[in-house]
Image: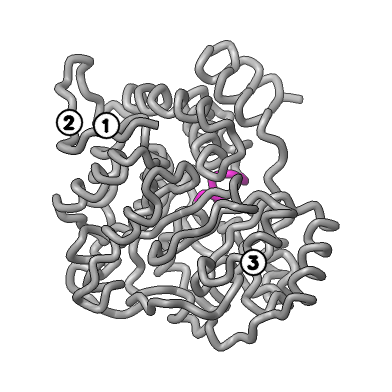
Amino acid sequence: MRLRQKIASYLEDPLVERMWSAFRGAGPMRSVSIDITHRCNLRCKGCYFFAESMDDAGEADDDRLHAFIASERERGITFATVLGGEPSLVPKRLKALASAFRLMVVTNGLRSIPQEGLEEIAIAVSMWGDRANDRALRGYGKIDLFDRALDNFARDRRARWYITLPPAPSDDTVEVVDRCVAQGHLVGFNYYGDLAHLGDTFDHRIGFAAARDFVDRMIDRHPGAILTTRYLNKVVTSGEMMGQRWGYGVCGSISVDAPQNAERLQNGNSYNPFFNAYGPDLTAPRRCCVGESRDCATCFDVWAHLSWVAMAIEKHVASADHFFDWLSTMVVFYGACGFIDDTQFRALLPQIAERSRSLDDPRSLPPDCPAFPSPYPAVPA
């Protein structure tokens, strides 16, 4: 009751009330992660799927896929993050999943994803840093994947771009963000864990302070188009939240049906009670969303950290500001995944950005701060 009373008092704030209504109106998100295929048309340097040898798993046949879908629906699952491998290589499987769940499909962008039967999915198109980094890490040193992906998903309202940042993003990354926004796309960020042991500027041990600053600048530059909050950006790049440190013991994206997690489920920290992460064979779930034995010190996955935030509502009701941080992060996540009406969500984004900037005193900018104009004209909706 105290939790409800606290929240009720915060809803006297009109913006918080609008966010809460959008969040609550979205319905339950009971999620799983699915690697739908072990095949891929790239082999990116630092991809956790290959670093963890998850491509060695067999691939479920159609009968197993349909049995899996029926079983997950019976568990109450409503949402699936679909990865691989490369999901665009198996559109029939995506359509089977989309008939049962809301989907966020993560793609490298090399192939378009058909509309028919997949009209309501959300698509996360990957980009790794600036063009030079992306070419080096994903394009074998010579292929410009970004322009191909822009063409493949031009004017596709399902598409969101997720840019994976090295510890210190170059200024050239701004051009990538601007181009995506100019096409009408929303843009999120991930952070590069150096699983390929490239070292130098890719070494996550440098820390992500510069990346945090870059993302905050992008929120200021495109307040109506960035799929993160200052709060989530700080949590991921610092590895700290409400007096806790990031790691296996607090991550909420652990498979509840994986036997190796039994002790973790009893340690008193929250977790998603529905979540499982499945490999391409769609049988026993693996340990967590990013692998079977991944060192959590190398994990900067935004959605894994988001689960940490999501499960900690009781920690965030201590003050109106903390509750705003929690709720705005959840609204951005739900909106990115298509659980909130797109028009409503896009109207909320700049309001969230403006409020969060005013709360973040060290980074606050005066009301007359000059805009950061994009050199690319926006594409009409």
Magenta region: 306-311
**Amino acid type, residue under disc 2 in the picture:** Phe
Q: Position of residue 324 (x, y in %)?
A: 50, 27
Q: In this view, does 352 lie to the left or right of 60?
A: left
Q: Which mark is residue 372?
A: 2
The x, y position of residue 273, in whole percent, is 73, 54
Is-magenta flag for residue 81?
A: no
Regarding residue 271, the answer to whether it shows in the image is no
Identify the amino acid type marked 1: Asp
Which marked residue is nearer to the observer: mark 1 or mark 2? 2
- Please state if 236 lies on the left or on the right of 312 as rendered: left
Q: Is mark 3 on a helix, strand or loop?
A: helix
- Prevailing SS of the magenta stretch: helix
- Alpha carbon distance from label 3 to label 1: 40 Å
Q: Is residue 309 magenta?
A: yes
Circles 1 and 2: CB atoms closer than 8 Å: yes
Q: Which mark is residue 92?
A: 3
- Residue at image location 50% in from the left, 62% down from the top: 247
Specify whether residue 171 is in view. yes
For residue 204, which quarter of the picture?
bottom left
Residue closer to the observer: 115 or 168: 115
Q: Position of residue 375 (x, y in %)?
A: 15, 37
The residue carrying mark 1 is: 220
**Does residue 22 appear to the left or right of 230 in the view shown?**
right
Does residue 349 lie above or below 100 as drawn?
Answer: above
- The foreground one among 60 and 11 is 60
Point 68% across, 45% down: residue: 29
Q: Position of residue 155 (x, y in %)?
A: 40, 43
Q: Please state if 121 lies on the left or on the right of 170 as rendered.
A: right
